Image (cartoon, grey):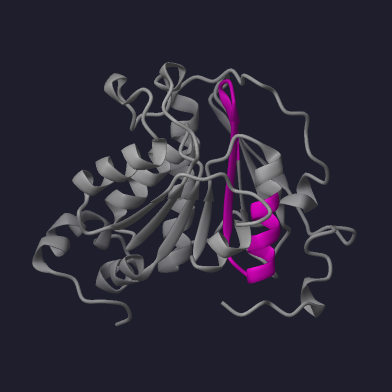
Amino acid sequence: MSGPSLRDEELERYDRQMRIPGFGIEGQRKLKSARVLVAGLGGLGCPASMYLAAAGIGKLVLVDREKVELSNLNRQILYWSSDVGRPKAEVVAEKLARLNPNVDVEALALEINEDNVRELVKKVDVVVDGMDNYKARFLINEACVAYGKPFVHAAIYGLEGQLFTVLPGKGPCLRCIIPSQPPEQDTVPVLGATPGVMAALEVMEVVKLVVGLGRPCVDKLLVFDGHEMKFHEIRVEPSPKCPVCSSLRSREVPPT
């Protein structure tokens, strides 16, 4: 079996998921060895980080420069009224430590930009999209492609959401399916449950990738329509003109 050993307390804590066929103790050890970056701690990042910690991811790197605002509280479920004004990364780290002390949490109160994105990405195994803008998403996508790291993307609007997983060299990247930066909206309407749905799906993708279960969402964009309570699949393929990944086969992946 691969990965670190599990204590009796961990065997009991993770008992239900280890009963999943193909998961077992070996799968849990893989989760304990995994390092996951949660980029953004808003509506997506809060529930995603909580479920990742509950699942037993060994190392979580949490990145968000903002402080908690009252208008966050309808959807960013790790923040409470008493947290308004506090740094988001600090609050999430504290609460995840209380949820699961077995998880190593690193909280970084900074903005992801051109200067730090590659340094952040190269130190982890998977990146989870908790961002609220495509400028940052495109930077993360490019870094993940450069270092061959999976990038689990999600975005939300109102009662709608989308999910897509980038596996460099095995499918399209985010720029293949969204070639140019969409117009940004200052205040996005959203029902709190919508990012909860999409964040849960992101975590499912991360666990599948780490443990080796099922098939990741690499050849389709999964679209959630909460108005009609339906999921739609849009088939996607690598773009031969993609400025990020079209030359991936001839590009040397930087050392980690």
Instruction: Relative to 106, say whether 223 is above or below.
Output: above
Question: Is the C terminus in the top left, top right, bottom left or bottom right quadrant?
Answer: bottom right
Quadrant of the image occupied by residue 86: top left
Residue 152 forms part of the magenta stretch: yes
Q: Quadrant of the N terminus?
A: bottom left
- 37 lies above or below 30: above
Residue 47 rendering spot, x and y as whole percentages? 39, 38
Q: Nearer the viewer, residue 242 or 221?
A: 242
Query: Quick check: can you spot residue 143?
Result: yes
Which picture quadrant has residue 7? Answer: bottom left
The relative height of residue 23 versus residue 114 in the rendered view (above or below) is below
In the current view of this chain or complex, which residue is farthest to the right?
241
Q: Position of residue 20 (x, y in %)?
A: 30, 60
75 lies above or below 207: above
Q: How many marks?
A: 0
Residue 110 vs residue 178, the one in the foreground? 110
Report the residue at 63% width, 70% height from top.
148
Q: Which quadrant of the structure image shows residue 5?
A: bottom left
Q: Would you say residue 170 is visible in this rendering?
A: no
Q: Is residue 245 magenta?
A: no
Q: For this view, does 162 lie left or right of residue 40?
A: right
Q: Is residue 162 left or right of residue 214?
A: right
Residue name at image x 16 percent, y 62 percent = 10
Query: Could you tell me which residue is drawn at 66 percent across and 44 percent down?
Result: 136
Which of the pair 241/183 is nearer the observer?
Answer: 183
Residue 82: percent from the left, percent from the top? Answer: 27, 22
Q: Give the range drawn in magenta.
A: 139-162
Expressed as whole percent of the image width and height from the top left, the position of residue 94 reads 26, 43
